[in-house]
Amino acid sequence: MIVIDKKDLLGGPRDASGPGWSSLRLLVKSDGMGFSMTETHVAPGAVLDLQYLNHVEACFCIGGRGVVTETDSGLRHVIEPGVLYAPDAHDRHEVSVEGEEPLHLICVFSPALRGDEVHGPDGSYAAD
């Protein structure tokens, strides 16, 4: 059984961040689950241009309010507590935050992240 207290991860290699976001990697590849789970915050005013070419992702919102825009179609989706979004076809998308509260997400990635990744110039994480 795996039991992790997020307090033990803060400030360590699983506590990743970049411009406008921070992501605590709760489960990672080395945990052997076949997927990873993160607690992610997107800062107010941030706009993230993302496309996970090597992973699929599902994000469940537990706080804040934002918009996910499908880059190719321009279709916009309001993200607020209780809403899940999953760019399941490696969709290029933009995540933006509305209001003064961070967007607070629980995210699952497959295949699992190592834990120390940051977004590359194309908005994706490298394949392992």
Image (spheres, helix red, strand yellow):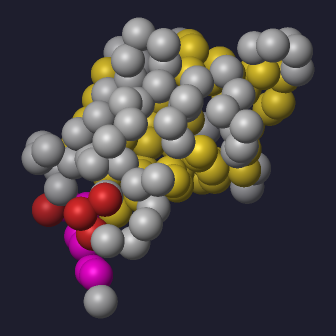
Closer to the camera in the image, 114 or 60 = 114
Q: Main secondary structure of the magenta part?
A: loop
Q: Relative to residue 11, is residue 73 drawn left or right?
A: right
Image quarter where the N terminus lies is bottom left
Q: Is residue 40 above or below residue 18?
A: below
Q: Position of residue 101 (x, y in %)?
A: 53, 31
Q: Is residue 102 visible?
A: no
Say whether residue 52 is magenta.
no
Image quarter where the C terminus lies is top left
Q: Relative to residue 99, is residue 23 drawn left or right?
A: left
Closer to the camera in the image, 29 or 44 = 29
Please give the name of the residue rendered at 72% of the width and 50% of the height, measured from the top-left corner.
Answer: 84
Q: Is residue 115 visible?
A: yes
Q: Which residues are magenta?
A: 2-7
Closer to the camera in the image, 64 or 53 = 53
Q: Position of residue 127 (x, y in %)?
A: 38, 36
Q: Position of residue 107 (x, y in %)?
A: 52, 51
Q: Position of residue 33 (x, y in %)?
A: 39, 72
Please give the name of the residue rendered at 49% of the width and 18% of the height, measured from the top-left corner.
Answer: 123
Q: Is residue 16 above or below residue 4?
A: above
Identify the image quadrant of residue 121.
top left
Please give the name of the residue rendered at 11% of the width and 47% of the height, measured from the top-left corner.
Answer: 12
